[in-house]
C-alpha cells in the first residue's frame, strides 16, 4: 500500500484554515500538517479590535475569536506545529522552522510532498530612522517585534494587543497611531478607550484615502476629532525618538504646511 502524500500548510489564518477544511471535506488521502507562527490556532483577525472587549487570551484556543481548537484539529487528523518557517529546501522537500511551542526552543524541520504557502500579509512599517534598533535588527525577519524600541507595536496579533494592554496597565498615557485607514482608526479608538491620549498620523491629506474622497475624508476627520482623538493629516514622519535604553519617547514629525520639525511625545 502506497504511503499517504503529505501536505504542509505554512500559515494558519483564515485562508490557511479554510484550505485545510476544504481538503478534509474532500476526504483526500493526505497527511496534513500546518505550521503556525503564533502560539494559538487560527482566529478571526478581521474582528481583532473586539478582543479589547473579550480579553480572553488565557482561553488559548477557545477565545471568542477562535476559528478552531487544538482538539478539533486533532480530530481532523491535522498536525499543528507551532513554529516560524525560516527556509524552504525544494530539493529535499522540507521546511526548516524555529520552534515556538511551550518548553521548546531551537530549530527543526518538516518534510512535505505538497507545500501550500498561506502566510497572509503583514503590517506596513515605515522605514524611518529609529523604527528598529540597529543592534537588534533581524536580517531574517524584518518585522521581528524584538527589533523595535520598547513601546512600538504593530496592530496584527493577539500578542500585539496584549502588549498594548500591558503598557496601559503600566501607566502609558499617550499613544500615537501611524496610519489613518480603517485599522488605524480602530487602533486609535482602542487606545482612547484605554484612557490614553490618542493621536492619529496620516501622510495623505485626509483620513481613509483608499476608501474616501477628500470631502468625505474631511468630514470623517471632524467626526474623529469630536470623539477626543487628535488627527494629524498630510504629516511627514521623520524619526522615532527613543531613550538610550531603547524605550520610545516620541515621533519627530513635520506637520502639513510647517517648516519646523516637532517632537510629538508619546509612550506608545
Image (cartoon, rainbow, N blue to C red):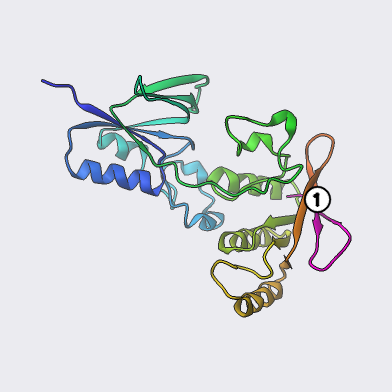
Most foreground residue, 40 or 195: 40
For residue 173, say whether it is visible: no
Say whether residue 95 is left or right of residue 244.
left
65 part of magenta stretch = no
**One can see residue 185 in this view:** yes
Q: Is residue 265 magenta?
A: yes
Which quadrant is the N terminus positioned in? top left
Farthest residue, direction left: 1
- Tell me: 61 left or right of 113: right
Tell me the crowding category of disc 1: few under 14, some 14 to 19, or many 20 or more residues within 10 angstroms, Cα based.
Answer: many
Q: Is residue 21 above or below residue 36?
A: below
Furthest toward the right, the residue is 260
Q: Position of residue 29 (x, y in %)?
A: 17, 33
What number of labels is visible? 1
Residue 89 x/y as whole percent: 40, 23
Q: Secondary structure at mark 1?
A: strand
Task: Name which residue lies at 70% across and 30% down.
Answer: 136
Magenta region: which residues? Answer: 250-268
Q: Residue at x 84, y 35 (%)?
A: 244
User: Residue drawn at (26%, 36%), measured in percent from left and top?
Assistant: 75
Q: Is residue 214 above or below residue 248?
A: below
Q: Nearer the viewer, residue 245 or 103?
A: 245
**Residue at numbered disc 1:** 250
Residue lying at 53% horizontally and 46% vertically, measured from the top left: 122
Residue 259 x %, y %: 88, 63
Residue 117 is situated, as x and y percent measured from the top left of the image, at 39, 38
Amino acid at each position: 500500500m502506497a504511503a499517504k502524500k503529505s501536505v504542509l500548510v505554512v500559515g494558519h489564518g483564515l485562508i490557511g484554515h479554510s484550505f485545510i477544511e476544504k481538503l478534509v471535506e474532500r476526504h483526500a488521502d493526505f497527511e496534513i500538517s500546518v505550521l503556525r507562527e503564533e502560539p494559538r490556532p487560527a482566529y478571526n483577525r478581521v474582528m481583532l479590535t473586539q478582543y479589547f472587549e473579550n480579553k480572553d487570551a488565557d482561553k488559548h484556543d477557545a477565545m471568542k475569536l477562535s476559528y478552531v481548537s487544538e482538539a478539533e484539529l486533532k480530530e481532523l487528523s491535522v498536525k499543528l506545529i507551532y513554529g516560524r518557517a525560516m527556509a524552504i529546501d525544494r530539493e529535499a522537500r522540507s521546511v526548516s522552522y524555529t520552534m515556538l511551542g511551550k518548553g521548546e526552543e531551537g530549530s527543526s524541520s518538516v518534510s512535505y510532498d505538497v507545500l501550500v504557502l498561506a502566510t497572509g500579509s503583514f503590517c506596513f512599517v515605515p522605514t524611518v530612522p529609529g523604527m528598529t534598533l540597529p543592534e537588534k535588527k533581524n536580517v531574517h525577519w524584518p518585522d521581528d517585534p524584538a527589533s523595535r524600541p520598547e513601546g512600538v507595536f504593530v496592530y496584527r496579533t493577539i500578542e500585539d494587543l496584549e502588549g498594548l494592554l500591558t503598557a496601559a496597565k503600566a501607566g502609558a498615557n499617550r499613544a500615537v497611531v501611524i496610519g489613518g485607514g480603517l485599522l488605524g482608526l480602530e487602533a486609535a479608538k482602542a487606545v482612547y478607550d484605554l484612557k490614553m491620549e490618542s493621536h492619529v498620523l496620516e501622510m495623505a491629506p485626509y483620513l481613509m484615502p483608499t476608501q474616501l474622497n477628500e470631502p468625505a475624508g474631511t468630514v470623517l476627520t471632524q467626526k474623529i476629532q469630536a470623539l477626543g482623538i487628535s488627527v494629524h493629516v498630510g504629516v511627514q514622519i521623520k524619526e522615532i525618538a527613543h531613550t538610550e535604553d531603547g524605550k520610545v519617547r516620541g515621533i519627530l514629525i513635520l506637520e502639513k504646511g510647517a517648516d519646523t520639525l516637532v517632537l510629538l511625545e508619546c509612550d506608545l
